[in-house]
Image: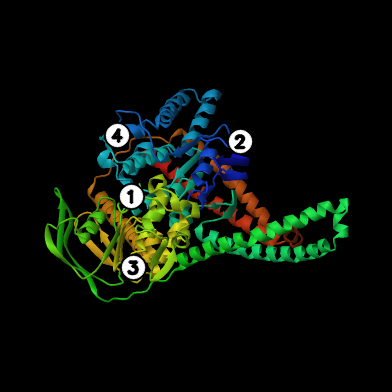
Amino acid sequence: MAYIDLYDIDKQYDVKLIFKEMDFHLEAGERVAIVGANGCGKSTLMKIAFGSEEPDAGKRVTDRSIEIAMLSQQPRFESGLNVAQAIESQLVELKEAQRRYERLSTLIAENPDDGSLLAEHEKISAFLDHHNAWDLGAKIERVLQEFKLKEYEDRLVATLSGGEQRRVALASLILKKPDVLMLDEPTNHLDVYMVEFLEDILLKENFTLLFISHDRYFIDRVATRIVEVEEHSLVSYKGGYESFLKQKELRLASMRKEHENLIRLLKKEEEWLSRGVQARQSRNQGRKKRVFELREQAKKNPAIIRKIQIELEREKRSWKGEKTMSKKKMLFEIEALGFSIGERRLIENFSTRIVQRDKIAIVGPNGSGKSTLLKLLLGRLKPDSGTIKRGEAKIGYFDQHREMLDDEHTLIETFCPDGGDRVIVEGRNMHVFGYLKSFLFPREYLDKKIGQLSGGEKNRVALALLFTKHYDCLILDEPTNDLDIQTINILEEKLLSYQGSVIFVSHDRYFVDKIAQKLLILRGDGSVEESHSAYSEYLEIEKELRSLDNFEKELKKSEKEPPRSKKRNKLSYKEKRELESLPSLIEELEAKMDELEACLADPECYNEKGLSSIGAELEELRKKYDDSSERYLQLLELEEELEGS
């Protein structure tokens, strides 16, 4: 069932065409990622699907019974609300449903044959099931903890940073669980632990999603389908990011084959057209027109194929990129480093050496001191204790505020401050447009002022500028923020071939895996751990250790605590209904399994239905039978336990 349908959508901003006769459909249970270059129309597609932006032409059709919600880049809250109140204000309907369910359960116990009460009870039960809102209090508590909002729950939302406010809005939407959730860069301002929690809850609770993200691991794990905005339309690919790359490669091969066929056809038609006389006859004018159309298509195809090929090669190299290690001269020697902010100790007694060609990622939770460590290395902050000895090295710095850019300068003034139109890049003398084209800037941008560019475009300029300078070491603070996947691929390519040292902070797990040879892991309690593991591997091990630690704590807690008295002495209404219906369901499943097993013994039957089809159906029935039998026994045991308490 389609929740959202877009038909023949046209959209244009001034002279810039975004979509032409574009179609898009979102089915229930799908998790669709939108990808494409910055400025191609990803956010526009989401806004049209949401209904906050009107297309110039075309039609939007939605299921009127569903709720659609979108995470805004700049969420708004009622004034005067603290964090807990802001979240609670989004859950009024769910809490009211809980209260009504409890009231109806009491009424049904008194009037078990009242059909209207039973029908309403069933409806509200399904509503709470859909939103997984049976234990809402525990869910709220967990989301506050996982998104690091528990410490702010009594603070006014207006006093939080933009990133923290987005976390509050995201937490509210996850708890509310609308029928369709739309997320624009949901992993921005989340550390890797928050991203893992977000992935888990989106998958576990089976959200229907439409989202934009440059986090390829997030896309690969969450998406059931990817739509790429290309040539004012959409190309759809099933599965996650890895599947997207494989299908894109097959599509490229198919496009090449189609182009070869087109050229062969065009040659035949050109021969016909060169005969002249026949082509001039009125009845052949349509064929003549077709020749001209084929010519235009033949001219256009190689450019499109080449563009897709370049993007695909970058993406594949990046996805499968290999890392090399090489150590030469010392850049930083850190001895017993210590640093605090107020009473909080961020770094305690940390020592290490950073040498030429090291590629190091500084990772850890938000607020653990990652950017602080970069500033200590740059000399912008002084350590409380210990020393940082700097070798003879020229350092380039890229920060999230793009402090090296002047909004009043044009692009050409930024790259050629002394005049002319040439830049030196890695020893090569290049025309500034030829260089900027590799960072996806068209020629007409050369005379644009920096202040007129979007945040993502400014980041591209800053990164491009960085590689026109000669540095021994690059220090980068969240370099992938506001970049699309194509630009991140270009950055990865540059950094993998870069001959100097790279020290960077990033929450992008895929980016860290591809670039870093070593991790410096800040815990936020002063400790700094060094690791040569891939970041994703380190996180998996850490997750397993946390699970074991939590299990041990629960075990010790249960050993110490006296057994608690039960708060209830009978099954809930929902459990009673389930207990009553399960025996007939189990019998029905047994009968179907017997029927299929009999079919497997009859060649005429299994030849007609197909062995693989029967086998798959039988396997599914056995699983349902096992699950239903196990649930029935659980409920019987629970009923006995409650009656005996």
**Crowd rating for badge 2 (residues with CA inside 10 Å; few <14, some 14–19, many 20+):** some
From the top left corner, tell me how far across and down residue 451 is, in percent: 38, 45
Tag 2 residue? 61
Tag 3 residue? 533
Task: Indicate which disc, 1 or 3, sits on the residue closer to the N terminus.
Answer: 1
Tag 1 residue? 406
Q: Is residue 613 visible?
A: yes
Q: Are marks 1 and 3 in contact (CB under 8 Å)?
A: no
Q: Are marks 4 and 1 in contact (CB under 8 Å)?
A: no
From the top left corner, tell me how far across and down residue 545 is, in percent: 31, 60
Where disc 4 sits, the SS reads: helix
Where disc 3 sits, the SS reads: loop
Q: CA distance from mark 1 to mark 2?
A: 45 Å
**Nearer the observer, 202 or 415:** 415
Q: Is residue 51 above or below residue 286?
A: above
Tag 4 residue? 158
